[in-house]
Image (cartoon, helix red, strand yellow):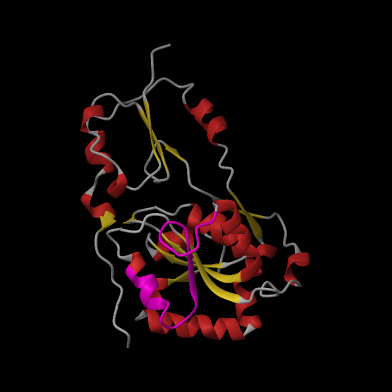
Amino acid sequence: MEQLLVLELLESPQHTIDLSFLNEMINYTVSYRWDSDIVVPYGKYIPFDSPRMENAIKDYSTGKSRKVAWLVSNCFTRNRRREYANMLSKYIQVDVYGSCGNGRISHVEGKRLIKDKYKFYLAFENSNCRDYVTEKFFENALLNNAIPIVYGAEKAFYEQIAPPNSFIFALDFQSPKELAQYLHYLDQNSTAYNEFFQWKQLGRVSLDTKFWCRFCAFVQSPPSHFYEDVNSWWHQKKDCQKFTGFNFTSN
């Protein structure tokens, strides 16, 4: 059997080196992006065969006394997410943990805090790139019963991969102040807050994408192609946006 060369990419193109040295070498690509040969998302939503009504009676706001949490280690990104979070914090409590915040805690401790104390989580990606939705959304927020406030991929993609009515899209609001007003409303209205968790009757979130099983099955067939220019395939200019549509004014 001839040797196969597989390229795995976990970060966005904006945080990936030039790949020209791999041109005319790669048979298969593995990444979160849906045009990869083997798609490996950071998580997925799996619908149940039938609704589970036992999940309908829980109040997911119970015991959660804090508003917004953010675990973040990359402080300087092209999409200005930190600037937006700073502006948001003028209008609602935003507790930042990790290298970019005041509270340096482990990832395990951070997730425990989110699950026990916080109603919302800033699932802000470090890049606004096609299909780029990471563990910030699936693991940090959804699996810890916090409503994710998302910024990264396009809204239509979140709607495609996420549980129904499970997230807040930051760009739906004209400013951080307007978003904060909506979060305050949800904080004071448990009925409206719990509507974001009705999906738990319909399905579950899993981080297990069965990668190795799918990978082994995939490579049993001989390579049908190789990438003449894998760098151009990955670094497509139209796939990432450098700047944001946020209105950073206080009005």
Above/below status of 184 relative to 117:
below
Q: Residue at x 29, y 82 (%)?
A: 249
What is the total number of numbered labels drawn onto the structure image? 0
On the image, the x and y values in percent for residue 246 come to: 31, 73
Query: Dividing the picture into quarters, in which one does residue 65 lie?
Result: bottom right
228 falls in the magenta region: no
Name the residue at the top extreme.
1
On the image, the x and y values in percent for residue 165 come to: 55, 69
Q: Is residue 236 left or right of residue 214?
A: left
Q: Is residue 209 left or right of residue 242?
A: right
Q: Nearer the viewer, residue 166 or 16?
A: 16
On the image, the x and y values in percent for residue 88 come to: 40, 77
Where, quadrant-wise, is the C terminus in this rendering? Answer: bottom left
Q: Residue at x 28, y 49 (%)?
A: 14
Name the residue at the bottom extreme.
251
88 falls in the magenta region: yes
Where, quadrant-wise, is the N terminus in this rendering? Answer: top left
Q: Nearer the viewer, residue 122 or 58?
A: 122
Q: Nearer the viewer, residue 135 or 200?
A: 135
On the image, the x and y values in percent for residue 106 come to: 55, 52
Above/below status of 247 relative to 95:
below
Above/below status of 31 relative to 7:
below
Q: Which residues are magenta?
A: 83-105
Residue 143 in view in this figure: no
